[in-house]
Amino acid sequence: MALLILLPSACTGAPEGRRIITLNGAGATFPLPIYTEWIHLYSQQNPSVIINYQGIGSGGGQKAILDGTVDFAGSDSPLNEEHYRRMPDLQMLPMVAGAIVLAYNLEGVDSLVLDGPTAARIFMAEITRWNDAAIARLNPDAHLPDAPITVVHRSDGSGTTEIFTSYLAAVYPEWEEKVGVGKAVEWPVDKAGSGIGGKGNPGVAHAIQITPNSIGYLELSQALENDIPFADLINAAGKRVRANAETMQAAMAAMAGAFDERFTARIVNAPGENSWPIMGYTYLILHMEPEDCAKAKALADFIRWAITDEAAARKAAEMGYATLPPEVGERVLEKLAEIRCR
């Protein structure tokens, strides 16, 4: 097998001239906004490479690459051991990290703060009205209505859901005991009749926007793009924090050593006074022993550009994503260098 990255000319069938190469990907909606922008920027510099990415959810992306219907997949949640048994050459590469926020639609309330147990109890349907004492205690100056809370959650298999439920389990043991962690769970609010499902982060954003007195978990860039207010949170250090570039970088730095042997990590309930507590890396899944060498090289070149290009980094920051710490970015580049063509 020829070493793809270091010796691209050795790859049989490598593209010559301006041959058009099309890469098809699908998966997580969490990174869909930044992937869309990156693909647009990259196509201006490399018009011979056409990249398509569909936001169908992390579960859909994992299924697609296992079924062989895409060249790469996007996922916010790790592959499991069964996935690796089916395709041992799959590799997850972190691309950016993002914050998950609790976005809300509450007339007359411009500022809201929640702590982890209170948020968990809302999603457990234990707190059902906005003027509940637990919410009021955290927001003494807010005019909280005596209105039922409608809770919006993902209806599809979602890495965003896995990150969010990981956080709820970390801050409220009863959540882990009764509901659990996963890309899809049985929501207590659905059983209580106060839950609404939305497909993808865009679906959740839309449901919050059109539903008065609602709250739901949402990727930060979607909240910013749609101008939906979101709550501050009390973090593991007991400090009130706002989701922004500074608090995301603080959380990433606090958990920089958390990667496992599969190169995946969670960033929930991170220590540190300035850490945002609900975050996760979003990953691209690709083959380390690809059959199509030309496609593999084109995909590796795009990933390398996204990790190292200053314009790509600026665009990610503008859209509310956290770029990889240098030591993580270096590990991604090292992993790319290990790709080999069959």
Image (cartoon, grey):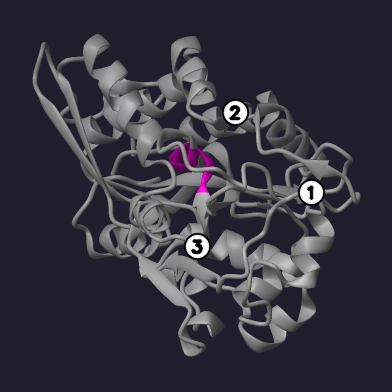
Q: Amino acid at mark 3?
A: Ser
Residue at (50, 24) in percent of width and height: 307
The residue that disc 2 covers is 329
Residue 151 vertical placement versus 21 (above, below):
below
Quadrant housing the C terminus: top left
| Picture coordinates of residue 338, whole percent (x, y) | 48, 36
Q: Amino acid at mark 1?
A: Asp
- Say whether residue 259 is left or right of residue 36: right
| Picture coordinates of residue 105, whole percent (x, y) | 50, 53
The residue that disc 1 covers is 141
Q: Using the numbered discs, state the Cα–Cα distance from disc 3 to disc 1 in whole angstroms.
A: 20 Å
For residue 9, say whether it is visible. no
- Say whether residue 122 is left or right of residue 170: left
Dominant secondary structure of the residues highlighted in magenta in the image: helix
Residue 326 vertical placement versus 222 (above, below):
above
**Callout 1: 10 Å neighbours few (<14), some, many (20+)?**
few
The residue that disc 3 covers is 214
Q: Using the numbered discs, state the Cα–Cα distance from disc 3 to disc 2 in whole angstroms.
A: 38 Å
Q: Quick one: label 3 or label 2, which is nearer the N terminus?
A: 3
Kind of element beneath mark 1: loop
Kind of element beneath mark 2: helix
Residue at (69, 54) in percent of width and height: 143
Residue at (78, 54) in percent of width and height: 139
Q: Nearer the viewer, residue 21 or 1?
A: 21
| Picture coordinates of residue 331, whole percent (x, y) | 61, 33
Q: Quick one: label 3 or label 1, which is nearer the N terminus?
A: 1
The mark found on residue 233 in the picture is: none
What residue span does the magenta drawing correspond to?
219-223
Find residue 328 and report its image quarter.
Answer: top right
Q: Quick one: label 2 or label 1, which is nearer the N terminus?
A: 1
The count of marks equals 3
